[in-house]
Amino acid sequence: MARPLTARQQNVYDFIVKTMSEFGYPPTRAEIARALGFRSPNAAEEHLRALDRKGVIRMIPGTSRGIRLPANGNETEPAESQPQSPGLPIIGSVAAGSPILATEHIDRYCPLPADYFSPSADYLLRVRGLSMKDAGIFDGDLLAVHRTQQIRDGQIVVARIDDDVTVKRFQREGNRVTLSAENADFAPIVVDLEHQHLEIEGLGVGVIRGGNGSGLH
Amino acid sequence: MARPLTARQQNVYDFIVKTMSEFGYPPTRAEIARALGFRSPNAAEEHLRALDRKGVIRMIPGTSRGIRLPANGNETEPAESQPQSPGLPIIGSVAAGSPILATEHIDRYCPLPADYFSPSADYLLRVRGLSMKDAGIFDGDLLAVHRTQQIRDGQIVVARIDDDVTVKRFQREGNRVTLSAENADFAPIVVDLEHQHLEIEGLGVGVIRGGNGSGLH
DNA sequence: ATACAGCCTGGAATTGTATCCAGTCATTGC
DNA sequence: GCAATGACTGGATACAATTCCAGGCTGTAT
């Protein structure tokens, strides 16, 4: 399934979602063109065709405002869309192996909208151990993760090194990446990108503690 | 507010709701007429006017499919319950004076159900300062609070001493209560219940960090 | 080099839709 | 009896909206 929307296509899609949640009906070509600054409704039409081809919308021919959003992952506005999402999935623990993203392994949800965090959270990971205690992340906490590879220095990331998944603070100097724990008992991990493979699973965007009866200690 | 819809008006209204939940956009006059067996779109138009007059829909003039359902009761089958509470109120900051419980000072909500925590949370407080950093509560974090006076030793409480509100760990020995910060830079506060007044606002039951774009540091 | 997708302008044909006008028929309240 | 309201038919008009056609300009694959 080819799904990489271009930046412009994403703009159009976002405007459709926004319009539908705000007004209750989809926009016309002219409205899209006006909102995005096109001088021709045809520009909007072509973007709609592209979005339909990629499967994120469905066009109903010959119908005014004939745009549908198939059941799918969307975000932006909660507002009053009918499918009430179960919330953010809790997909596993860090330091207890690899988090598994398959739906069948998700047993719990935290009823928070994804866009409560910014950038928006894609899933939650339960953190094991105290390696990040000086960053305020304790054993049993849920870490909200935004799935991305774009990391800036000093941010907290979920990284995978040889099938080992950890939460660490990220620092890069040329080809050397340092993953630091926030706890004096743990030594930093230095990865040489030329010889070792480092995969970034995502960016830490939030922490939740005390949910599901785990309490506060 | 006169609101008794006639049977026919109810039919039209039901068809609008059904169409919107099924297709994602409202019907046209012609579609309503076809569905209800009218031979003229004008019949639908007049019903729409009546529904607009009675306030159950809103018509947007000059706009195709320009029908909106104002926030209101809906029915049929989409299994959509609207009594969606706004979530937990964020009622103020600790260490910046007294938290005010009046509704007019609540500007933000965290869209989490109260019973996500256990015992359930009644409100959220934004914590200022680092006095609880060793307990994983950092500056800017939201503390979920369960309003109660029943505290056990070692729990984290929101306490009020002479109009000063703080978050501390609670310890009681006879008539002497010790409120300890979780930070070596802060000295514990010892309260003699015979001479000083100590009011317990509630019990800390959870922590949320990173919401509302505050990010993770 | 050439082809192709993405992204856009400008114009125009055609159909979809909202909306008005003129009536008909029945029911209800005054 | 008469006005008011609800529930329509039938037809007409003007604008809203989709959709096609003919381009241009930028990249990135082949």
Image (cartoon, coloured by chain):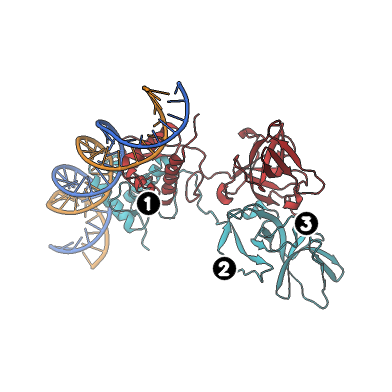
Chain colours: A red, B cyan, C orange, D blue
Q: Mark 3 lies on which chain?
A: B
Q: Do labels 3 and 2 share a chain?
A: yes
Residue for badge 1: B68
Residue for badge 3: B134
**Label 1 Cα crowd, 10 Å radius (few <14 / some 14-19 / many 20+):** many
Is D25 in front, or is B30? D25
Is B18 in front, or is A108? A108
Image coordinates for residue A44, horizontal then vertical, percent: 36, 41
User: The disc labelled 1 sits on which kind of residue?
Assistant: Arg
- Quarter of the view holding residue B161: bottom right
Q: Residue A34 carries which label?
A: none
Is residue B33 something one can see in this rendering? no
Q: Mark 2 lies on which chain?
A: B
> Could you tell whether A104 is left or right of A133 in the image?
left
Which circle's residue, 3 or 1, is located before the other in the chain? 1
Q: Assign a secondary structure to mark 2.
A: helix
User: The disc labelled 2 sits on which kind of residue?
Assistant: His
Residue for badge 2: B105
Measured Cα–Cα span from mark 3 to mark 2: 30 Å
**Label 2 Cα crowd, 10 Å radius (few <14 / some 14-19 / many 20+):** few
Q: Assign a secondary structure to mark 3.
A: helix
